[in-house]
Image: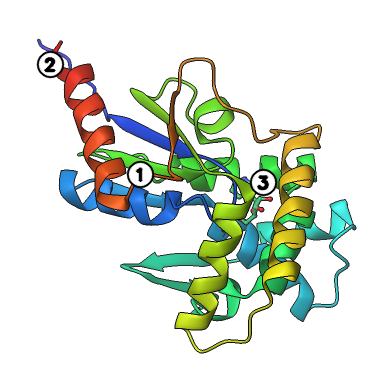
Amino acid sequence: MSSAIPVIVPVITIDGPSASGKGTVAQLVAARLGFHYLDSGALYRIVAFATLQKNIAWNNAQGVSECAKTLNIEFVNEQVFLNGQEVSNEIRTEAIGKGASQVAVHPPLRAALIDMQHAFCKAPGLVADGRDMGTVIFPKALLKVFLTATTATRAKRRYQQLLDKGQPANYEHILQDLQERDARDQSRASAPLVMADDAILLETDNLGISAAVDTILRNYQHKICK
Ligand code: C5P
């Protein structure tokens, strides 16, 4: 009697700092390959949003992680739902981004979100973006990418994104905010933002979105064919 052959799911991880372009690039790579997409930053943002609503302080490790375990989070195409209510725009504000990086320092919260992230790993494949996708969550990923750009480039991008959305933007504040977030993400004890030893580095200061996508697809092709 033959036993069932386990399904092997290819995973591509794209890690990097805020505003490096990894979200856009990851979604395009996923679309080109017909793979599932995990925006892990959205999970931390949802937790920051939900705890703010419940008056749980972002530095309360226990409160934040207990709250996270009760949340019903769903991703439907590009929309994000929290307990049945759409929160796609609410979680994208600068304030919630800042909160996300504060709740993300807590090891019990990071542990509480592991199974949820692993559940995205389904056939035909997964593209996962975040800070610790290649180092902690999917250490055996087939291809790992570290996407980055200088702080000035990233701040300019964020500034332009806010203006394009018709929102108020102050370049100096954005730059300072990014520097603070980078420092917090890189220096935390649990799952800090670091490039995995076996990741490829893509610096996007002078590399457009489609060139970054093509480079990742070429590297993926190389991994599966050679
Ligand atoms: O990627 P995004 O800016 O949406 O992430 C918001 C915050 O969530 C980050 O600044 C980071 O602190 C945290 N995060 C994390 N680990 C991930 C993804 C995001 O700690 N895998």
**Neighbour tally class for label 3: few under 14, some 14-19, many 20 plus, Cα within 10 Å:** some
For label 3, the residue is: 112
For label 2, the residue is: 225
Query: Toward the viewer: 111 or 38?
Result: 38
Lateral position of residue 175 relative to residue 3, left or right: right
Tell me the kind of residue under disc 3: Ala
Residue in the picture at 85% in, 77% down: 55
Which of labels 2 and 1 is toward the front? Answer: 1
Look at the numbered disc 3 and say if its residue's Cβ is closer than 8 Å to ligand 1: no
Which of labels 3 and 1 is toward the front? Answer: 1
Tell me residue 92's x, y (percent).
56, 72
Which residue appears farthest toward the left when viewing the image? 1
Q: Quadrant of the N terminus?
A: top left
Disc on the earlier residue, 3 or 1: 3
For the residue labelled by badge 3, is the local secondary structure a helix, a strand or a loop? helix
In three-dimensional space, the C-alpha distance between marks 3 and 1, rounded to whole angstroms, equals: 36 Å
Q: Is residue 52 visible?
A: yes
Above or below, 16 against 174 in this view is above
Lateral position of residue 109 relative to residue 9, left or right: right
Residue in the picture at 24% in, 49% down: 210
Tell me the kind of residue under disc 1: Leu
Query: Toward the viewer: 115 or 220?
Result: 220
Which of labels 2 and 3 is toward the front? Answer: 2
Instruction: Name the quadrant containing residue 224.
Output: top left
Tell me residue 171's x, y (percent).
67, 70
In the rendered structure, find residue 207 and report the number of the disc placed on it.
1
**Neighbour tally class for label 1: few under 14, some 14-19, many 20 plus, Cα within 10 Å:** few
Tell me the kind of residue under disc 2: Cys
Instruction: Name the quadrant containing residue 70.
Output: bottom right
In three-dimensional space, the C-alpha distance between marks 2 and 1, rounded to whole angstroms, equals: 25 Å
Tell me residue 105's x, y (percent).
78, 45
